[in-house]
Image (spheres, rainbow, N blue to C red):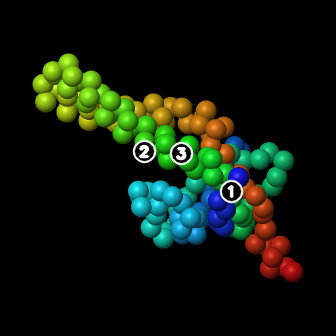
Amino acid sequence: MNNISKEGEIIALTDKSVTIRYLCASACRNCPAQNLCPSHENQNKEIEIMRDKDKIYHIGDKIKINLQERSGWLAIILAYLMPLAIVLGFISYATAEKWSELTTATIGLLIVPVYYILLNRMSKRLQTMIKIEIQEKQSQKGAEEK
């Protein structure tokens, strides 16, 4: 199974998480959803990853993050395809039941934020399904000493 790797830098730490800034460019070339994805532009992105309790990290450490291709596809399905399918399914149902266009459109537009609120509330569970891991770490201070 293919993995997507990105190099980044640790910019913030808590007891439970590591915040990493990375350049969003290299993995986008190989991603099948690059034309649909709003993060396709070459720019710095930040991501918060659950911290491995056995490893010591410092702000400024250069690291490599790793995402399994399966996890990337799951994220695309949950973020883009599921809400589209739900809205289209609802519109089809409402049209078949001969609901008014105003009611159908209003409820159809309200479905999307409700879906994303529910998705946000499930973030802890999704973090176990979509695994982004710190693959390797090289301390900036250690690199300067060598």
Which tag, 3 or 1, sits closer to the chain's start? 1
Residue closest to the eye, 10 or 5: 5
Count of numbered badges drawn on the protein: 3
- The residue at 56%/36% (across/down) is 123
Which tag, 2 or 1, sits closer to the chain's start? 1
Answer yes or no: is residue 13 visible: no
Q: Which of the 4 image quadrants contains residue 95?
A: top left
Mark 1 burial class by Cα count in 10 Å: few <14, some 14-19, many 20+ = few
Instruction: Name, please, the residue furthest toward the front.
Output: 96
| Residue under numbered circle 2 | 80
Three-letter amino acid code of the residue under disc 2: Tyr
SS for callout 2: helix
Q: Nearer the viewer, mark 2 or mark 1?
A: 1
Which tag, 2 or 3, sits closer to the chain's start? 3
The x and y percentages for residue 93 are: 27, 24
The x and y percentages for residue 22 are: 59, 65
CA gap, disc 3 and disc 1 = 15 Å
Q: Which mark is residue 2?
A: 1
Residue closest to the eye, 79 or 143: 79
Q: Is residue 141 left or right of residue 78?
A: right
The x and y percentages for residue 78 are: 49, 40
| Residue under numbered circle 3 | 75
